[in-house]
Amino acid sequence: MVGYMQLHRIILARIFFFTFLLIQAFCVAAQVNTDSLWSVWNNEDQSDSSRLKAIQVLIKQVYLSTDPSLADSLALIQYNFAVECNQKKQMAAAINSRGVAALYLGKYEVSKQFFQESLEIAREIGDKFAEASALNNLALAFYSEGDIDQAIYCFTKKSVITEEIGDDNGSAQTYINLGVLFTSQGNIPKAIDFYHKGLRAYEVLYDSANISIALSNIGSIYYEQNDYENALEYFLKSEEISSAENDLRNASIACNNIGETYTALSHFDKALKFLTKSLQIKEQLGLKKGAGTTYQSLGKMYQKQGDNARAMKYCVQSKNIFEEIGFDEGLANSHILMSELHMSNNNFSKAINSGKIALNIASRSKNIGQIKDASKSLYLSYKEIGQTSKALTMHELYVANRDSLYSEENQKEIIRQEYKANYAKQALADSLDYIRKKQVREWEHQIVLNKEQNKKNFLYAGIVFLILIGFLAFYGYWRKKRANQIISSQKAEVELQKLVLGEKNKKILDSITYAKRIQAAILPPKTILQNSLKDCFVLYKPKDIVAGDFYWMEQKNGKILFAVADCTGHGVPGALVSVVCNNGLNRSVREHGLTDPGKILDKTVEIVIEEFKKSEEVIKDGMDIALCSLENNTLQFAGAYNPLWIIRKNDNSITELKGQKQPIGRFHNIEPFKTATIQLEPGDCVYLFSDGFADQFGGKKGKKIKPSGFKRMLLDISGKDMQEQKSLLNDNFESWRGEIEQIDDVCVMGYRHTG
């Protein structure tokens, strides 16, 4: 069962390192002033470059890791603006950010398309740093899909660029990445080579966090070769550095490594101590992949002690986590361990089932370590139940992959690379300056040689250049002529479509404008409002040409009935619903003679539901409403969701009568509406309204006014004349909204009681 533990170690290193790279590559840890950046972006007086840089920082450092969908939308805005400004560097950055967002969301094919497009722009403008970034991210996308060969190809091309431009940190990251990828393929010599390259580079950069990672990965190779003493030495160094730097992520990985190594050495008390510490850190940081891996480590530890029940418990926990997050490699390991445990319990059918699942996953990703362990488990299980043909097939598969992992060449390569690493450390410590001087002399010599060769090359190139110029001039003229013909044809087609679309839009707009006249006819005229309520106002602001909000008034038996209603939706759909609901109120009063607000709403519910029943489809539309009845000083109120606010004269607070939490329309458990009665005094102000005013976004931070803000406005202006209140409310609303679009219909009715 040693093979499982070795592969388990490799997977652990890969889980952490690529998580670390994603954080490092995409979301630079920095404190940013979000409001300040938004201010720069929204300020058209700022230069185009400043605005693009501001939104780029917002995307990379604020939204990519917290809200990838929003980051993608912002990156699209950045890209379109960069196109307008013809800033190709920012175009490449925006497309790269969209690729990262898609990668976070698990859309690997989409992310690859974005990274490829970003790569092409970077090459076009000769931006080597952007080209290296696009290649890095493209490699991560291939890795996330399990395409290791393509990931290696992209990282190799990136390493050439980072070495060329002197990006030491980028080169170091790429070396470690390549080490991880070659490890997963079982190419131990190349893995060791790249790990040591990365370690040496990070030692020169004094990068403690990445030195810790490199030590951990080198230790994993020793672990894989059963050299637990050397593996433990590297893991302990990694843990020591991480703890000293308070680097919890690396510390959690190192503790897991140490725990697994102690398990291999049968030091179970020490193993449990370090594995428990690792699990606590990972759960504290919310590292699900890492926690799943540590559960596997605990399961393996208990398996080695012969406690299969506890081992299975931890194994199932790891399997559930990996299924939840869709991490196939970890899931394959869980099924390998479960297969071994079922086999120990003589439950060979379950052992075979888990082994098949593990082998299927490992075969898709070409992970020879997992293929080896899964095929070994299946071989032993088939052998026990007497299926010799299947057992032989699995045994052959097991031996082939085992030999690939434990070849003599790999063992020798570890010794050779360890010697090279020790020598390189000493050389760096004693003669770094000498190496730099030697490089300078070599470069100077190479420059002299290049000058001579360049003279010859220049002559040859001149001749070829003149021939090419002649050809390109003719070809360019031909292409330009052809392109002009195509453009002229397309322009004519666009103009024609524009005319057709304009005519259609005009007809639609004329129809909606006429509908506005029809809707206006159902609203009570201002003269009737003023004659009935005397001192009142209505602030009516449809979001579109027609609205779902409306105000209503009737007089019956000496009572003045008035209301503000908010129908489902806005625009044309809302307006259609408002006609049905307005008709329901009119019929409740005019046909049925009702004046009690609660009874009016009950009857209106019946009428609205009856009207909508005529449709073949189930219609759940309706309205929210605040309805009042006024007779002398007595005010009665009933509401569907919407409340009634009263500000008493010389009072600095609002009395609220709440509406019932049910609409006028279809509802699962509708109850009779209740009527509330209150006595008004001269000077009292009564307000009815829809939710459009309080829900409007705006202000400095783009937030809602909210009911609390609406209340403060009313309290501030309640002592003023009603028409002045209307004007102030409108001014406050428009000032708050600013450049932000009105999101809903607005209807506010105010009335001051005169006795």
Image (cartoon, rainbow, N blue to C red):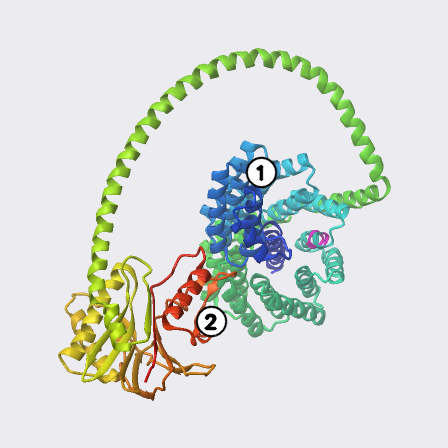
Q: Is residue 441 above or below residue 608?
A: above
Residue name at image x 55 percent, y 36 percent: 122
The reply to whether dot 1 and dot 2 touch (C-beta < 8 Å) is no
Q: Considering the numbered disc 1 on the image, is that residue within a helix, a strand or a loop? A: helix
Report the residue marked by disc 1.
131
Q: Is residue 270 above or below residue 153?
A: below
Q: Is residue 385 above or below residue 714?
A: above
Query: Percent x, y for residue 52?
Result: 55, 45
In magenta stretch: residue 378: no
Dividing the picture into quadrants, the one containing residue 583 is bottom left
Between discs 1 and 2, the one toward the N terminus: 1
Dividing the picture into quadrants, the one containing residue 269 is bottom right
Which amino acid, mark 2? Gly
Dot 1: few (<14), some (14–19), or many (≥20) neighbours within 10 Å? Answer: many
Q: Quadrant of the N terminus?
A: bottom right
Dot 2: few (<14), some (14–19), or many (≥20) neighbours within 10 Å? Answer: few
**Spatial distance from mark 1 to mark 2, Cα to Cα?**
50 Å
Question: What is the span of residues highlighted in magenta in the rendered image?
Answer: 211-216
Query: Percent x, y for residue 555?
Result: 20, 79
Report the residue marked by disc 2.
709
Q: Considering the numbered disc 2 on the image, is that residue within a helix, a strand or a loop? A: helix
308 vs 93, nearest the viewer: 93
Which amino acid, mark 1? Glu
Residue 425 in view (yes/no): yes
Query: Percent x, y for residue 644?
Result: 35, 79
314 vs 572, nearest the viewer: 572
Q: Quadrant of the C terminus?
A: bottom left
In magenta stretch: residue 215: yes
Query: Percent x, y for residue 21?
Result: 61, 51
Q: Main secondary structure of the magenta part?
A: helix
Residue 666 in view (yes/no): no
Residue name at image x 64 percent, y 39 percent: 159
